[in-house]
């Protein structure tokens, strides 16, 4: 059975997907980290949250920077071109949302 958080928040959906991918679909075989991941901090690439960054960077260095099955390739976050494209996409989504609100207001007023 899904929890409401698993359907309502991005973090909840990510944890549920991790439970499906790495656990039995209900729970994870490990405690998920509750800290946020920020791809770049003070111009430095981050491999994980500030708590787990050094350990994950060490593991990736040992494994020749190869991400494991199910892991997101962090180069997606670090590539400046893709970050610019992502920012443009966010602007586009925000603009479309604003336009949608304006249309809803017009519909309510009957104009």
Image (spheres, rainbow, N blue to C red):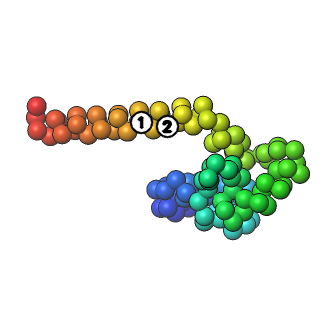
Assign a secondary structure to mark 1: helix
2 and 1 marks in contact (CB < 8 Å): yes
Q: Residue at x 74, y 65 (%)?
A: 29
> Is residue 5 at all visible to an observer of this figure?
yes
Residue 101: mark in rendering: none
Q: CA distance from mark 2 to mark 1?
A: 6 Å
Q: Residue furthest bottom?
A: 31
The percent position of residue 21, horizontal first and vertical second, equals 70, 52
Q: Residue furthest front?
A: 42
In the picture, residue 32 is in which quadrant? bottom right
Few, some or many residues within 10 Å of mark 1 (<14, 14–19, 20+): few
Assign a secondary structure to mark 2: helix
Query: Left or right of 1: which side holds 111?
Result: left
Name above or below for residue 59 compared with residue 83.
below
In the picture, residue 66 is in which quadrant? top right
Query: Left or right of 8: which side holds 78?
Result: right
Q: Residue at x 52, y 53 (%)?
A: 10
The percent position of residue 111, horizontal first and vertical second, equals 10, 31
Q: Residue at x 41, y 33 (%)?
A: 92
Residue 91: mark in rendering: 1
Q: Residue at x 72, y 47 (%)?
A: 71
Few, some or many residues within 10 Å of mark 2 (<14, 14–19, 20+): few
Name above or below for residue 21 compared with residue 104.
below
Q: Quadrant of the N terminus?
A: bottom right
> Is residue 21 at all visible to an observer of this figure?
no
The percent position of residue 103, horizontal first and vertical second, equals 22, 34
In this figure, which residue is indicated by the disc labeled 2? 87
The percent position of residue 64, horizontal first and vertical second, equals 87, 44
Q: Residue furthest left?
A: 110
Residues 4 and 85: in front is 85
In the picture, residue 35 is in which quadrant? bottom right
């Amino acid at each position: 059975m899904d929890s409401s958080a698993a359907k309502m928040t991005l973090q909840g959906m990510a944890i549920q997907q991790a439970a499906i991918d790495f656990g039995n679909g209900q729970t994870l075989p490990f405690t998920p980290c509750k800290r946020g991941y920020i791809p770049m901090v003070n111009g430095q690439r981050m491999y994980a949250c500030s708590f787990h960054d050094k350990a994950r960077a060490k593991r990736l260095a040992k494994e020749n920077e190869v991400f494991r099955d199910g892991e997101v390739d962090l180069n997606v976050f670090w590539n400046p071109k893709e970050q610019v494209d992502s920012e443009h996409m966010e602007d586009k989504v925000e603009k479309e949302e604003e336009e949608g609100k304006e249309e809803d207001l017009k519909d309510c007023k009957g104009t």
